Amino acid sequence: MSVFNQSRRRVIQLIILGMVTLIVTRLFYLQIVEKKYAKLADANAVLRKVVYPSRGIIFDRKNRSILSNDVLYDLVVTPASVKNIDTAYLCNILRIDKEEFKKRIVTAIVKNGRVRQSVFAPLLAPEIFGQLQESMYLFQPGFELVPRQIRSYPYPAAANILGYIAEISPAMLKDTANYGSYNSGDYIGFTGLEKTYESVLMGQRGISYLIKDNLNRPQGPYENGEFDSAAVAGKNLRLSLDIELQMLGEKLMKGKSGSIVAIDPQTGGILAMVSGPSFDPNLLTGPYRSANFNKLYLDTTKPLFNRAIQAMYPPGSTFKPMIALVGLDEGVITPSFGYPCGGAYYGCSRPIKCEHHDAGHAANLRLALSHSCNSYFSHVFRLSVDAAKFGGIRVGGLQKWADYMNSFGFGHRIGIDIPSEGRGLVPDKKYYDARYKGSWNSCTSVFLGIGQGELLLTPLQMANAMCIVANRGSYYIPHFVSSIDNDNTHLLDKYKVKHEVAHISDTAYSAVIHGMTDVVESGTGRIAQIEGITIGGKTGTAENYGIVNGVRTKLKNHAVFVAFAPAEKARIAIAVIVENSGFGAKYAAPIASLMMEKYLKDSISTKRQPLLKSVMETVTIDPAMLAKSKLDSLNEHAVIKKPTP
Amino acid sequence: MNRAQTKLTQGIDWPIVGLYLALVTIGILSIFAAEYRGEGNILGDIIHPTKNYSRQVIWFGVSLVLAAIIWLTDSKFFTATANLAYAGGLLLLLLVLGIGKDVKGSHSWLVIGGFQFQPAELTKLCTNLALAKYLSSQETDFTKLRSRLIAAAIALIPSAIIILQDETGLALVYFSFFLVMYREGLPGILLVIAFSGIVLVLSALLVDKIVLFAIFTVITALVIYFSRREIKRKRSRLAIILGVYAFCSFFVMFVVPFAFTKVLKDYQVRRIEVMLGKENDPKATYNTRQSMIAIGSGGVWGKGYLKGTQTRYDFVPEQSTDFIFCTIGEDFGFAGSIIFLAIYVALLFRIIFVAERQRSTFTRVYAYGVASIIFFHLAINISMTIGLAPVIGIPLPLVSYGGSSLMTFTMLIFILLRLDADRQMVLR
């Protein structure tokens, strides 16, 4: 019937076309005009993943790796896939209870959701890992073991030198100028070489772009890895450090607080640097890191305090060779200059006692040094600073003397390649003007002549001074890293520069060196003798004062010994300090001597084994302090306390 | 032999067959793309009984068997059994109400031997046949109100039952039969009223009630003022205007809010509000947002087949069924989408062309019914994926994954082809 409605066909066709036009217009807007959808799609689907390179390895001077990478395992959980497992058994292996198990699962779900992996137990201890690995099939697929790189120290030594890495702190992350390339959760060197050489050790992080699905699960490389950049492993460091010597040093310092610094004067390379008491660096890596850190940090013996570069001591008599050098160079004395000491120095109002009183024990520089005559060096110091050519002590005399000291590397940071180096203290004109308000003279500062008074040096500075004496007026900035593999940085440039000190004459050095060899041959340091090797050395017994209950009190003396050997062409310069022990000759000299013997002869002779044993058994740390210490400073192997599981 | 073959396919409308095959093929490829994850070799993955694309291939095979059976059936069978089929369809719908199974929030599935089957899909076919039968019968005078009401009832009774099954999307499809009735003589004013109704509902949702009421009042006042002379001539005009004004106000102030709080489900209200931009709840907008991101990121030329990142990695939900258009939009871009839409328009226009060449009213009504159903599905489904319509779960004909849907549309089309082949006969 209804052929009359032919025109309605057109209307229906128009309705269809109208609707399709509407759809096409909308598609035109979505797909061509609006660009945000393409970006949103990328944000939806591309996962940017940082690929961590392996960190550089550190080798000692004999190419033994002393800081490398190890693999520990994290137990990760995918909560949604945990089904039908023997929870009690797993708890048993992990040594946790069921409550803890539930808590960790809930934490994982809250943190990353049910279908993504979260860490359930980080950095499993080896014994737990062993047990877990055998039974892992019981807990899959909900649980899995994922390898994670950690730092490991094959030798339980050199903790303060090598340093440690830890997760970057929120404060550092805010400092985008310095740490802009780091992300939350990244590890970064916090102390020691790990910190100084962070930029070369860390390597270059790679980025891989992964396609992800709606639950953020990676599904494979994006565009076949076209935009990925590969990770570049960190560069290896090669040190001048001798790890065996270092371990010997740490053994020798067992039960003592103090420091040993041994340097190769030919290169400035540090051979050993001990801060006693020391600890096993492995305490600060792996699963018990933070617990151990807190123990070390709060320990009464301050093991994290690197005494070799941070502690400052009066050098005592070991300072006398430097006084002599200044006097010789300024021309106020000659090597044959003598002083009639009768047991004390009476030049100033208060007499300064001398250990010797026999006539002629200070008849010339060489004798005065070997007998460590206090009167002689008090006099020489006053001659130097009061010299007329500088206009007297308060005009230019003391300043001139302080300049000498600065050029010897005292009173400022030398520039070693680990952080937190101390400055020490060399009092100059300004210092005395401020302290004595202009009313002072050479008697005020006369104690500087015997290495006491306001003077403070770090053990590193003392050892470096020995390099200067042994090298007859030059040194290289002491440093650990002798080379970086495939180095393209300028980090090591400053350690290749030879520093000339104050152009003191060769004869002056000869006189001082002769005096110092006599110290060991026939003077106060005879205990340091090594068969067949000429040693130049100087003992010191540094008086020190501390504030005890608000009163300036004299504490037990520090034993100090500085030396270099062989005297003809030194291969090792060393400074040893044993805090609060007593005579330098008794406590410090044997340690220095054993270290030099080990380094120069590669082993300690049988004859000297009893000495080695007795030194190792000597305990000088205050027993009260030791009792409170959580660190097992008296343990046989280095000085570690067993990590508490 | 040769003669037998010519006879076998004689009268078949090849353009429709071609377009049908094109759409089903695009569908299977798109379902494959939606599930493809890039692992393994593509050929090895073809046979994979747990994957939707493999199942869809099987459904396609079943559909072809059905098509062959229909082709070999006598045309008169369909006219003869139309009412019976309708009755059977209604029974099936009621049966589902009783023993149906809940799938994704709708109580509209029958489970027969491990297969799920949605009768609401099939009843589209039954209703179409019944409507064609009624409108083509000699007793029917479609200019009469009674006939129009009966026709509307035939179309809307299944719809009502389907609403009870919580499958609102498919229930809405039955309104597409009004397009057929329009073609058969329903006054055009009804289309205008329907359109105005939609505008009213939308404005009721978008604009504040009081403001809307004020607008209506102003418009009514203006209409009365400008038609004051006509009103003087004919007093009833004023009554009509005031009646329309009263109805609109009542509708907007009471009917729409009531429908939204009492009749529609919470999630449906939210979907509509999301579509209108009234709500920004990320969870509620997730589907539409992901779908628009997928399609929008396709750009002009698309990312290439199997290279879309959004559809391949499950960002778009329901992507092999309701949101299958995302795959096409993302992989083939604007250009591909236009070609895809053009295939549908070609199919719809070809069906209308076929409808108009019929001698039998039955076949013409039936053909318009097929076109209307496909058009309604197409318009709602694609509008939903591009944020033009609220998320209403209805499939894209012949393309979306799903056996019930594919078989229903195959039967709809092949019955049309069978009827068209016999267009010289007068069928009632």
Image (cartoon, rainbow, N blue to C red):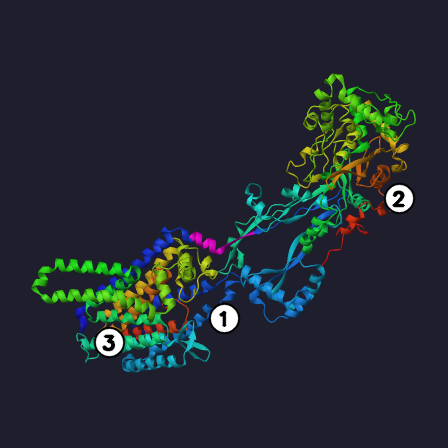
The span from disc 3 to disc 1 (Cα, nearest Å) is 43 Å
Question: What's the residue type where badge 2 is placed?
Answer: Leu
Where is residue A261 shown, x and y percent of the image?
77, 39
Q: Is residue B377 left or right of residue A136?
A: left
**Do the residues bearing badges 3 and 1 touch, measured as CB atoms within 8 Å?**
no
Q: Is residue A45 left or right of residue B203?
A: right
Residue A302 falls inside the magenta stretch: no
Provide the chain ID for the residue under circle 3.
Answer: B
Q: Residues within 10 Å of mark 1 (few under 14, many from 20)?
A: few
Indicate which disc residue A123 carries: none
Q: Is residue B263 left or right of residue A624?
A: left
Question: What's the residue type where badge 1 is placed?
Answer: Thr
| Disc 3 target residue | B151
Q: Is residue B314 above or below residue A387?
A: below
The span from disc 3 to disc 2 (Cα, nearest Å) is 118 Å
Q: Tell me which segment is drawn in magenta.
A: A38-49
Residue B197 makes an appearance in the image? yes
- Mark 1 lies on a secondary structure that is loop
- Where residue A198 sits, quadrant-wise, is top right
**Do the residues bearing badges 3 and 2 touch, measured as CB atoms within 8 Å?**
no
Q: Is residue A170 left or right of residue A479?
A: left
Where is residue B57 shown, x and y percent of the image?
44, 70
